[in-house]
Every structure is written in C-alpha cells, then in structure tokens.
Amino acid sequence: MQPLMTETELATYLDEVFPEMKGKFVIEEVSPMFARVRRRVTPDDLRPGGTVSGPTMFSLADCAFYAVTLAMIGRQALAVTTSCAINFMRKPEPRDLTCEARILKLGRALAVGDCTIFSPGVEGPVAHATLTYSIPPAR
C-alpha cells in the first residue's frame, strides 16, 4: 500500500488545518506506513535543567503519527488520537528532535502504531510512544 500524500502535500495540508503549528514541524520522509518528522526546538520548549520538555516530545509523537496516518488515508482532518502512551527514556539535548512513526496496523476505523524519538548527540532513543488513531467513516 503506497502513501496517498507526499511530504510536500502533507506539510501543506497540515499548515492549512493547523496554522498555529506552522514552522514547528518538518516532514522529512514519507514511505509506506512510515514517516519521519523533525520538531524544531526553541527556548520555549525547554524545561529547567536544559532539556526538552515532555509535552514537546509528546506533541512530536502525536504529530508524527498523525502525519503517517494521513499519508496513508489521505486528507481527513478529523482523524483523532484515541490512545497514546509515552515512555521518556533518556535526557534529550536542547536541539531539534526527530521522530520515526510507523503504522503497525491500518484498518478502516483505527490506525495503531508507534513512534521513536531521537535527539542529536544522544545514543539511542530518548522516548518511545504507542498510539491509536480513530479514522472517520468514509462519506
């Protein structure tokens, strides 16, 4: 099953439906059941101790899984998160983060998968999340 949207089409669509997020996320790669998304980290995303905040990493995982889901099902803004569990494993550097999102099962009503977040200069992933998205019924 091939993606229905390219990196550029996906980025343009996300800017349309979530203009408040414009400039924060970069869609780096889309392939079957996979997307890699970079989160631009600013001083507003840091917490005491010079690390990236948990909510920033959570938003990256959620956005990356939304991106891979839309890439596979097309322009359906009403696909929504129904479940997310995230494990923070290592302290990320205060720099841009990268998330690799994979769909493990894509059905008519649900997409289930995981996201692994990486930080430059840190060996191994800094966080891992499992997500489920609800896909709206076809009209």
Image: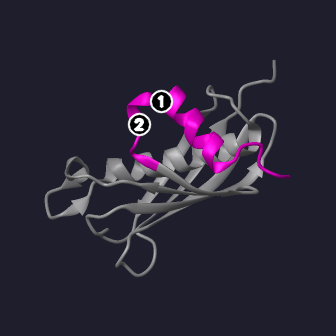
Q: Residues within 10 Å of mark 1 (few under 14, many from 20)?
A: few
Q: Residue at x 81, y 17 (%)?
A: 139
Pinpoint residue 17: horizontal percent, then vertical percent: 53, 27
Which residue is most to the bottom? 123
Tell me if residue 134 comes above or below residue 137 in the rendering.
below
Pinpoint residue 133: horizontal percent, then vertical percent: 63, 39
Which residue is most to the top? 139
Q: Is residue 93 left or right of residue 36?
A: left
Q: Is residue 51 left or right of residue 5?
A: left
Picture disc at residue 117? none
Picture disc at residue 18? 1
Label 1 secondary element: loop
Q: Residue at x 35, y 72 (%)?
A: 90
Label 2 secondary element: helix
Residue holding disc 2: 21
* Gap between marks 2 and 1 measured at Cα: 6 Å
Q: Is residue 50 left or right of residue 77?
A: left
Q: Residue flagged by tag 2: what amino acid is it?
A: Met
Q: Residues within 10 Å of mark 2 (few under 14, many from 20)?
A: few
Mark 2 and mark 1 in contact? Answer it, CB < 8 Å.
yes
